[in-house]
Image (spheres, rainbow, N blue to C red):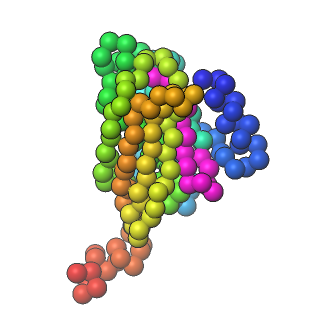
Amino acid sequence: MMAQYEKFVAMSKDGTWKRMPNHKHLIDDIPKQMRPEPAAKKRDGTRCFLRNVYTEGLGFEFVMFFSASEKRVVSIFQPGLYLEGLTGYMHGGAIATILDNTLAACSLLSTGRMITANLSINYRSPVPLGSVVLVDTKVDRTEGRKTFVSGQVQSVDGQVLHVDATALCIKLESKNSPQQQARSSGSPEST
C-alpha cells in the first residue's frame, strides 16, 4: 500500500494530482463553494460511515487522489477484517460502499454538489481481505445536471479486475438558484 501511496504523492508534487484529506466527515473534504446549504450541517456525534471504525486496519483503509484536469479520482484501498463477507474476502456491500464514495467524490470534485441517483456494479472476482487495490474513477460526461461516472476496482498491478461500475450523479440546486426560486414560488416557468 505504501508503494502505491508514494507513487501518487510523487505525482502530486507537480500539481496534476491532489491528495484529498481524510476526515471524520465528508463535508470537511468539500470545497467551501460547493458545500450544502446550512440546513445540511453536520451534527455532533456523527461520523462519515467509511470512517466509523476507531481501530486502524479493521475497516475502510483508503486514501484518495484527485486530478482536476482528468476529472478522475483514484483511491488506494486496503479492506480490513471487519469488511468480510465470504470467508477471507470483502463483502459485496462494502465494495459497493467504497465505489459509491469514490465515484461520488469524483463527480463532486469535478462538477460540484451532487447526489448519487443510480449505481450499477458488475462483480468480476472477489477482493481478498488485506489486499491492496486501486479504485479508479472518472467523469465520462456531463449533461445539464447529470454527471455520468465510471470506475473499477483492480489489483495494483492491473492484472485482476475485481469490479467495474457506472453511476449517475445529479447536481443539487442551491435554494437561491433561479430554478429553485421558480419551483417554490409556483410560477408558470416551474411546470
Measured from the top left, where is residue 165 in percent x and y? 38, 43
Q: Which residues are magenta?
A: 66-79
Measured from the top left, where is residue 80 in percent x and y? 45, 19
Name, please, the residue furthest toward the front: 159
Measured from the top left, where is residue 141 in percent x and y? 46, 61
Q: Is residue 63 magenta?
A: no
Q: Does residue 76 appear anywhere in the picture?
A: yes
Specify whether 164 is left or right of 65. left
Give the position of the C terminus as an image quadrant.
bottom left
Quarter occupied by residue 53:
top left
Give the position of the N terminus as an image quadrant.
top right
Name the residue rendered at 64%, 41% in the picture.
19
39 over 9 or under it: above or below: below
26 over 143 or under it: above or below: above
162 over 72 or under it: above or below: above
SS majority, magenta: strand
Name the residue rendered at 37%, 60% in the picture.
170
